[in-house]
Image: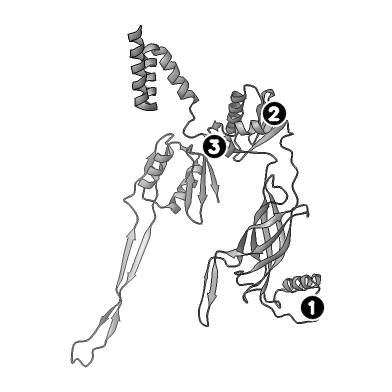
Amino acid sequence: MIQLRHQESAAARRRRARGPAGFFSSLLANLSANLSASLLLALLLLTAATAPSMGASRIKDLANVEGVRDNQLVGYGLVVGLNGTGDSLNNSPFTRQSLMAMLERLGVNTRGTNLRTANVAAVMVTGNLAAFSTQGTRMDVTVSALGDASSLQGGTLLVTPLMGADSEVYAVAQGSVAIAGFSAEGAAASITRGVPTVGRIANGALIEREIPYDLAAARELRLALRNPDLTTANRIAQTINDFVGSRSAIAADPGTVRLALPKGYGGNIVQLLTDIERLQVEPDQVAKVVIDEQSGIIVMGRDVRVSMVAIAQGNLTVLITETPQVSQPEPFSRNGQTVVVPRTEVQVDDENQRRLAVLRESITLQELVDGLNSLGIGPRDMIAILQSIKASGALQAEIEVM
């Protein structure tokens, strides 16, 4: 008995010497020796079933909680301190009126005077009020010139109320404007890089009013899918129900999943959202081909399929080259004249090397692209071919032209 204890102590010392990796290796070896082959197979199948697939995404990235959203704010203000790059008051009457009204509020009477300053610019101030923003916190704003100012560099935005769609003031903006572009000019040349009439003020607005929304008191929420799809909505509902162990989620339509608070969360719906937003769901999508004819860009989804179809593509190209030559008379000839002799070369390319290509039944996206590329066509011709395949009924996908 004493010898057996000494042997176990030595084995434990060897496991400690090998570290965590050695401990787990020995543990697996012991399990393999003691468990039956059928039990090991069941464990492997269970691990494969619970592991997330490669195309899965978090529910947080697929859907938004209805009611938790940003709100857009807008305001009108003045930027001062510009180095002669502001609005010309003769061409911008709104800038003149705003400047006079501001000076009157500060006790300066400018009525009847001729203002000639070029250091002031009228601007529009925009920003997004994030959800659950509290009073006293700050937000970023964007400043954009409204008149004929050439640059906002070095300017300072004066106090500007920011209003929502209900015409109520939710924030007040003020601060130095930072721009990414610049503009410089001389007597005979000028250069402009970026957009010097648009700037940004980091943390430039102070939130004065909160938008009330009591999330913790809710007993039922709606998840709004960013890309509405009936299959994706059903998968999200099933994943949530499997996690909580009850039918708390129902796919109401392709863009909405209704979520009720289960009994096991003690009335805390925030904890429920924290748990389910990390669940993995593989989204589904409609087979679609997006075409931008202006830039020649083609984007195809992975589920695009094509039935058996034959494709031939070719254009008739006629190339005419003029290379005139000069004909001069022999030396010392009396009646010779120098004339220009036309030389014309005509080439016809009917692309007879291109043959009729046959795309077999239900080919994949990669095979479709390879088949079209084998014809030697460019993006412009490929757009026309895809539209023709869709018109023939052989393309099982939507075509969206941007």
Residue 286 lies, in percent from the top left, at 54, 38
The residue at which mark 2 appears reads as 260
> Where residue 44 appears, x then y in whole percent?
43, 20
Q: How is the image coloured?
A: one colour
Q: Is residue 231 left or right of residue 372?
A: right
Q: CA distance from mark 2 to mark 1?
A: 63 Å
Q: Where, quadrant-wise, is the N terminus in this rendering?
A: top left
Q: Is residue 184 above or below residue 285?
A: below
What amino acid does circle 1 point to?
Thr
Alpha carbons under labels 2 and 3: distance apart: 26 Å
Q: Nearer the viewer, residue 111 or 331?
A: 111
Kindly indicate whether the residue at mark 3 contacts the one at mark 2 (C-beta within 8 angstroms). Answer: no
Position of residue 10 in the picture relative to residue 130 (left or right): left
Callout in the foreground (2, 3)? 2
**Residue 285 percent across, percent down from the top left:** 54, 37
Compared to residue 185, the image places residue 7 above or below, namely: above
Q: Are marks 2 and 1 in contact (CB under 8 Å)?
A: no
Q: Nearer the viewer, residue 324 or 249?
A: 249
Q: Which residue is mark 1?
A: 110
- Pointer 2: residues within 10 angstroms few (<14), some, or many (20+)? some
Q: Which mark is residue 285?
A: 3
The structure residue drawn at horizontal position 36% and vertical position 62%, both measured from the top left corner, is 318
Compare marks 2 and 3 and give the one earlier in the sequence.
2
Q: At label 2, which amino acid type do we have?
A: Ala
Q: Residue at x 69, y 28 (%)?
A: 261
Is disc 1 placed on a helix, strand or loop? loop
